Amino acid sequence: MNDAAHSRRRDRAADGGLFVLAVLAGLAVAVLRLEIEPAPGWIMTADTAAGALGCLALWWRRRCPTVLAAILVALTTFSETASPAALVMLFTVAVHRSAWTVVLLAAGSVLTHTVYLTLRQMPLVSMVSTWVFVSWILLVHVVVVAWGLLRRGRHQLIASLRERAVAAEVEAQLRTEHARLEAREALAREMHDVLGHRLSLLTINAGALAYHRAATAEETQQAAELIRESAHRALKDLREVISVLRAPDGDMPLPGVADIAELVEETARTGTDVRLLDEPGVCTGAHAVPAALGRTLYRFVQEALTNARKHASAAPIAITITAEPGAHLSAEVVNEAPPVRPAATPPGSGAGLSGLAERVALVGGDLRHGPTRAGGWRLAVRLPWPA
């Protein structure tokens, strides 16, 4: 609002300044005409009236500059005092209208001024060649038109810069919003992968402790210790996730293929029958797996184990890892049919696979899952391993 008010005040000041300039120039021309060659009274009256009308028309120069410029150019055929106002209107047309309109009006103005010199013979024109005056008129028009075109170019440049600034601001806002959305999705994936795995272990141990009434004191203590350890690890993993999200890239370590064996061992300690077949020796460091690829494989195994504990808690789980360095890295997690089907689908089912599919897609991999013929479930991933 302040910019609009400032622009209006600036336009009014410019209109007032051009009006005063046209009036003073018209008076100077009239006085010069009286000193050089006094004309009949009715001619001077008509000349002065045309000049006054031309000066008043300048207040509407922004609304219809082309029409007013054409009228004032026509008046300069017999009115010398209207010339300053006509030049101001020509300048306005050069600022706001097309180049062809400016050229036509400028050519017409040069022609009408030449006609004026022809009709109103002056002693000064007789003394100096007529071509000198015509050249002078032409030079004045060229200067006025060039000035107007420069002003128009400057206005267009400023408008273009403003548009670019607005576009850059909108683009920056979109980038910020996109980055915020990606950060939220990354946080959701990390929280689901880490806490889902830990809390599923916690649920299994707590369920065993609650339903196994005939457990000995040693078994109860062992289950309680597993619960305590799982809760402690869940809090630790949560702190690590938050630290990774807050810290700059690369400042905090993230899990990789070397941590898969520990993940499987931790699951086995809960009593789950889980086997890891890693013939290429990926988990033992036999091959240098890229960090992003190893992290994706770790999250794949973690999510597969979490889902197996949710939907088939007592079923054996087989993990198979195959690799061909420079070509691909593949893994498959298969759980057999559970002895007892879960009564209801656990809340949040499906969110983990969606997040895992996003992770795999980010590294250009392929994720597949579905039931097996024996009634179990198979989750497989194939990741590209560039040379």
Image (cartoon, rainbow, N blue to C red):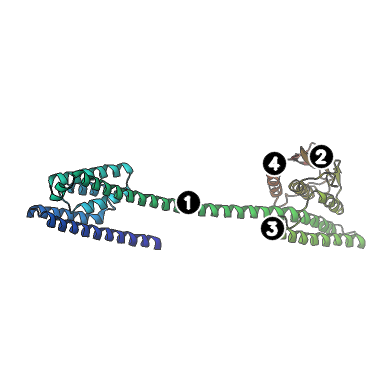
Q: Is residue 344 left or right of residue 158?
A: right
The CA distance from mark 1 to mark 3 is 31 Å
**Position of the N terminus by quadrant:** bottom left
Residue marked by disc 4 = 364
> Mark 4 or mark 3: which comes first in sequence?
3
Q: Secondary structure at mark 4?
A: loop
Q: How many discs appear? A: 4
Question: Is there a contact, CB below 8 Å, between mark 1 and mark 4?
Answer: no
Q: Secondary structure at mark 3?
A: loop
In the rendered structure, which amino acid carries the disc numbered 2? Thr
- 386 over 164 or under it: above or below: above
Horizontal and vertical percent position of residue 254: 76, 54
In the rendered structure, which amino acid carries the disc numbered 4? Gly
> Mark 2 or mark 4: which comes first in sequence?
2
Residue marked by disc 1 = 164
Label 2 Cα neighbours within 10 Å, binned few <14 / some 14-19 / many ≥20: some
**Picture quarter containing residue 34?**
bottom left
Q: Nearer the viewer, residue 175 or 103?
A: 103
Query: Can residue 160 be seen here?
Result: yes
> Mark 1 or mark 3: which comes first in sequence?
1
- Disc number placed over residue 248 in the picture, else none: 3
**Picture quarter containing residue 318?**
top right
Q: Secondary structure at mark 1?
A: helix
Q: Spot the residue most to the top.
A: 373
Horizontal and vertical percent position of residue 240: 75, 59
The CA distance from mark 4 to mark 3 is 25 Å
Q: Nearer the viewer, residue 364 or 318?
A: 364
Question: Is there a contact, CB below 8 Å, between mark 2 and mark 4?
Answer: no
